[in-house]
Image (spheres, grey):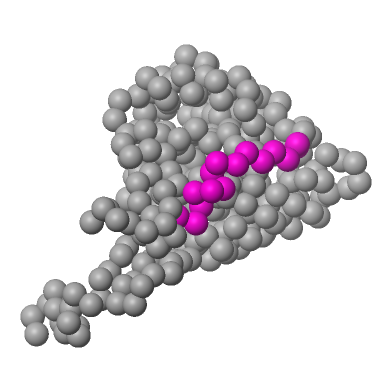
């Protein structure tokens, strides 16, 4: 019963038609009302000699339905990796970039942002017990949203290409990376992700993505969110396309990076159990024959 829910104990709302989250009265709610910004002008994407086996599947602009279908099939087959391995992948990616970092090469902020994401992953991705009265347990979990669209312009900086995609993958989502160019820059960024250990089955790349096709994908595709690194032209286009959608309200994630950034890529689920209702009968609580 949501009537009389207590702040900090029984957070509620924030999913589907209830909004884009986080839940009112939950630990991430106040953070969502604050905008933080860390300026990050990334360099041109570096080339990499890392070998990561098969690459992510590449699709043409008009093939976005097939790209989404491929991600859904992979998710249904259970090909994603567990939260501990996802955090390890972010750490590996940071080490790969640190090995290439030189003074004034424009990579300064990206490994630091990845370190912050790793910390958020360790904190957020485990179930969290909330305080509550005696005879009641309250647990909050963060779950993947689904397939997240990550658009970026050709020739973008490293942070623009990597940070939203890394956050989406760290939260357990699939990512559909879109570029209005030939895809060379974002293909190199994708190879960084694969070299770090993220599965190719969770990543699809759309090349030569015209604005009309991108708007069509966002307004009609079976997606869970849109994430761009910084507000701008792409955010405005995505916002207009999201407004045209029917059904559940989907978030546009273009926030400045902060402590609650990773939580934006997740659904919050709260489970409250009234243990006193069992009257001490564990079989009754579990709804099994005594």
Q: Please state which of residues 268 and 99 is positioned toward the viewer in this rendering.
A: 268
- Along the viewing direction, whichever of 220 and 92 lies nearer the viewer: 220
Q: Is residue 193 magenta?
A: no
**Left/right of residue 122 with respect to residue 204 in the rendered view:** right
Extreme residue toward the top, this view: 212
Q: Quadrant of the C terminus?
A: bottom left
Q: Position of residue 228 (x, y in %)?
A: 58, 33
Residue 268 in view of the camera? yes
Residue 160 at x, y = what percent?
66, 35
- Magenta extent: 26-40
Residue 17 at what x, y percent from top left? 31, 36
Please tell me which residue is depicted at 43% across the width and 67% down the height of the picture: 130
Residue 284 vertical placement versus 50 (above, below): below
Question: Vertically, is 23 above or below 17?
Answer: below
Quick check: 181 left or right of 98? left
Q: Is residue 36 left or right of residue 267?
A: right
Residue 221, by quadrant, is: top left
Q: Nearer the viewer, residue 165 or 140?
A: 140
The quarter of the picture where residue 179 lies is top right
Which residue is at the far front? 4
Point 83% across, 39% down: residue: 106
The residue positioned 45% from the left and 35% from the top of the image is: 251
- Residue 143, can we see it? no
């Amino acid at each position: 019963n949501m009537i009389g829910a207590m702040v900090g104990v029984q957070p509620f709302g924030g999913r589907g038609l209830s909004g884009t989250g986080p839940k009112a009265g939950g630990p991430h709610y106040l953070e969502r009302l604050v905008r933080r910004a860390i300026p990050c002008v990334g360099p041109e994407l570096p080339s990499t000699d890392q070998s990561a086996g098969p690459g992510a599947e590449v699709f043409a602009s008009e093939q976005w339905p097939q790209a989404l279908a491929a991600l859904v099939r992979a998710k249904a087959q259970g090909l994603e990796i567990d939260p501990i391995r996802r955090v390890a992948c972010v750490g590996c990616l940071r080490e790969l970039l640190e090995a290439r970092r030189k003074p004034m090469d424009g990579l300064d902020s990206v490994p630091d942002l990845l370190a912050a994401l790793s910390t958020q992953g360790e904190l957020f991705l485990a179930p969290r017990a909330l305080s509550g009265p005696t005879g009641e347990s309250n647990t909050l979990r963060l779950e993947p949203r689904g397939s997240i669209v990550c658009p970026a312009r050709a020739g973008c900086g490293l942070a623009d290409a990597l940070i939203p995609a890394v956050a989406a993958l760290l939260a357990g989502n699939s990512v559909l990376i879109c570029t209005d160019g030939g895809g060379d820059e974002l293909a190199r960024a994708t190879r960084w992700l694969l070299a770090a250990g993220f599965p190719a089955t969770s990543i699809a790349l759309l090349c030569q993505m015209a604005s009309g096709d991108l708007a069509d994908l966002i307004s009609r595709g079976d997606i869970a969110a849109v994430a761009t690194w910084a507000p701008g032209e792409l955010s405005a286009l995505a916002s207009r396309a999201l407004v045209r959608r029917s059904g559940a309200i989907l978030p546009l994630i273009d926030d400045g990076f902060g402590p609650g950034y990773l939580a934006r890529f997740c659904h919050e689920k709260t489970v409250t159990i009234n243990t006193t209702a069992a009257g001490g009968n564990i079989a009754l609580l579990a709804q099994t024959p005594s």
